[in-house]
């Protein structure tokens, strides 16, 4: 927590007293709500509510031990003999992941499907005597397990002869995209990597983003497009699963105009977003369960621990982002038992921690509310029911009074993001020795804000939404009691 802001928030409590009535007069002088604040599309809302997606990195690198192939690898080395995409999808589903994204082509240019655009593909490999199609097996497995299927198609291609030539490569890339988006059924996300290096001829490519985006919209209108610059969801700015404490789902589209746009301050913009931004473009946190994105034999003992995955969940999903966790198949084409075990531990910990909202049964009062969006709706688990303050309010409070004392160490807050993200600052206090005591202060909330703290015992809790850019509207307030240990680092903690 930012100490300075906490003290500011704390002094406000002292000045304004404990009654809560302080906010009633403020509402009358605040400006009328603007209806112009951005809201998510139904596709973006579905995307964010999934919370967990699994990345699957597989290519010739799995067999060479490299992280970035240079495009000269022979397809003869690609032979994941026991490849079982159902094993990947079953593992993801059991761990609560709702979609998966496969590297159909990484920077080395090797295509995991039998494309007509190049011979640098599975069709030239010994795997299934050149008759296999990893993309087909992957998409079918996702659908069989009820998961969304997404595809990564690296714009940077270190094998394609036409790379760096402009139009010719753009045509080649669009042809690959078209195959992927027309031959395999529904695709929920298309992942455009920002890495843009030189091709085999030493030249860089200028990508035709307007045409690429239009192709996706035309062929898969419901698919979410990811890149640093969106257009639907943005990169969170690091590959460590850490979204900023202050994380807006809105951005100014001009600040990161195209994927790979590289300025020293871009990381901050991507991480924080912009409360005044005109585009709804929430952040995705991609990170690997191992040090590398691809499987390497010597990293089997460096798989993150369940505790570390919990820490990632708090710093990504719990900071209004989505966690895209990479689990790379080995040379047999299977997830390793180490990765599966740690995912099972992660799931068990999440299920145990979030099983019971200890605030259920509390009597809830609010500074104002608008029927039918009444205060008690924040206690149910339905993200579509919510409490709304009066439309002119910019600051508000909710008070929870419980029939008996509870002990908790984890707080969950959630805005009703279907209606936008508005809250800039919030303060949580608990009732102790006949007075309100500050417990934690934070900035944005968004889809989910998770905060861990030392265990607290109380019968009353107060949440003050200190400033909103629009009407404060909350879908969720919950308190939980976790295990006594902190979610600590795993081997791969950076
Ligand atoms: C990066 C790539 O260069 C890595 O190899 C990996 O695919 C990661 C998800 O994105 O930009």
Image (cartoon, rainbow, N blue to C red):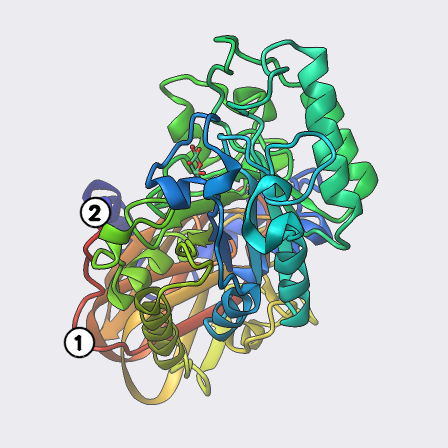
Q: Quadrant of the C terminus?
A: top left
Q: State yes or no: discs 1 and 2 in contact (Cβ < 8 Å).
A: no
Would you say 228 lies left or right of 478 here? right
Q: According to the image, label 2 marks what residue?
A: 7
Mark 2 residue's CB less than 8 Å from ligand 1? no
Residue under the image location 59 percent in, 16 percent down: 163
Q: CA distance from mark 1 to mark 2?
A: 27 Å
Q: Dot 2: few (<14), some (14–19), or many (≥20) neighbours within 10 Å?
A: few
Which quarter of the frame holds ligand 1? top left
> What label does residue 79 carry, if any?
none
Q: Quadrant of residue 153?
A: top right
Q: Read off the residue under disc 1.
A: 484
Q: Looking at the image, which residue is at 65% across and 45% down?
A: 113
Is 184 positioned to the left or the right of 304 in the image? right
Residue 210 visible, this angle? no
Q: Residues within 10 Å of mark 1 (few under 14, many from 20)?
A: few
Residue 2 in the image: above or below residue 166: below
Q: In the visual, does 2 lie left or right of 146?
A: left
Q: Camera-side residue: 368 or 456?
A: 456
Could you say where residue 236 lies in the image, as x and y percent from the top left? 44, 39
């Amino acid at each position: 927590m930012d100490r300075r802001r906490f003290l500011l928030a704390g002094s406000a409590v002292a000045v304004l007293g404990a009654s809560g009535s302080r906010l009633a007069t403020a509402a009358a002088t605040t400006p009328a709500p603007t209806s112009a604040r951005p809201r998510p599309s139904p596709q973006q809302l579905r995307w964010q509510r999934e919370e967990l997606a699994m990345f699957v990195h597989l290519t010739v690198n799995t067999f060479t031990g490299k992280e970035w192939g240079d495009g000269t690898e022979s397809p003869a080395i690609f032979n994941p003999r026991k490849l079982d995409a159902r094993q990947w999808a079953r593992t993801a589903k059991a761990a609560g992941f709702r979609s998966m994204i496969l590297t159909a082509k990484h920077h080395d240019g090797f295509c995991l499907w039998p494309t007509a655009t190049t011979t640098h593909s599975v069709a030239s490999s010994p795997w299934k005597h050149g008759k296999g199609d990893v993309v087909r097996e992957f998409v079918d497995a996702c659908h069989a397990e009820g998961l969304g299927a997404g595809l990564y198609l690296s714009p940077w291609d270190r094998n394609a002869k036409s790379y760096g030539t402009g139009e010719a490569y753009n045509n080649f890339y669009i042809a690959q995209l078209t195959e992927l988006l027309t031959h395999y059924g529904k695709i929920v996300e298309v992942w455009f990597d920002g890495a843009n290096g030189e091709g085999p001829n030493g030249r860089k490519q200028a990508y035709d983003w307007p045409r690429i985006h239009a192709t996706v919209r035309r062929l898969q209108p419901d698919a979410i497009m990811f890149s640093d610059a969106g257009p639907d969801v943005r990169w969170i700015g690091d590959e460590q699963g850490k979204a900023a404490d202050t994380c807006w789902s809105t951005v100014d589209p001009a600040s990161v105009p195209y994927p790979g746009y590289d300025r020293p301050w871009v990381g901050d913009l991507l991480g924080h977003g912009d409360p005044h931004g005109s585009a709804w473009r929430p952040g995705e946190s991609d990170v690997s369960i191992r040090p590398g994105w691809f499987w390497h034999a010597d990293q089997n003992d460096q798989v993150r621990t369940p505790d570390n995955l919990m820490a990632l969940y708090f710093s990504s999903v719990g900071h209004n982002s989505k966690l895209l966790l990479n689990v790379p198949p080995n040379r047999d084409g299977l997830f390793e038992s180490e990765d599966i075990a740690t995912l099972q531990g992660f799931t068990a910990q999440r299920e145990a921690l979030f099983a019971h909202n200890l605030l259920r049964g509390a009597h809830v009062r609010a500074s104002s509310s608008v029927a039918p969006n009444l205060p008690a709706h924040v206690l149910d688990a339905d993200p579509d029911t919510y409490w709304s303050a009066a439309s002119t309010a910019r600051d508000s409070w909710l008070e929870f009074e419980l029939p008996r004392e509870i002990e908790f160490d984890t707080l969950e807050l959630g805005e009703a993001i279907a209606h936008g993200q508005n809250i800039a600052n919030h303060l949580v206090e608990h009732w102790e020795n006949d007075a309100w005591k500050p417990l934690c202060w934070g900035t944005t909330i968004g889809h989910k804000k998770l905060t861990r703290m030392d265990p607290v015992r109380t019968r009353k809790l107060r949440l003050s939404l200190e400033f909103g850019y629009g009407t404060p509207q909350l879908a969720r307030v919950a308190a939980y009691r976790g295990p006594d240990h902190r979610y600590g680092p795993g081997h791969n903690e950076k």
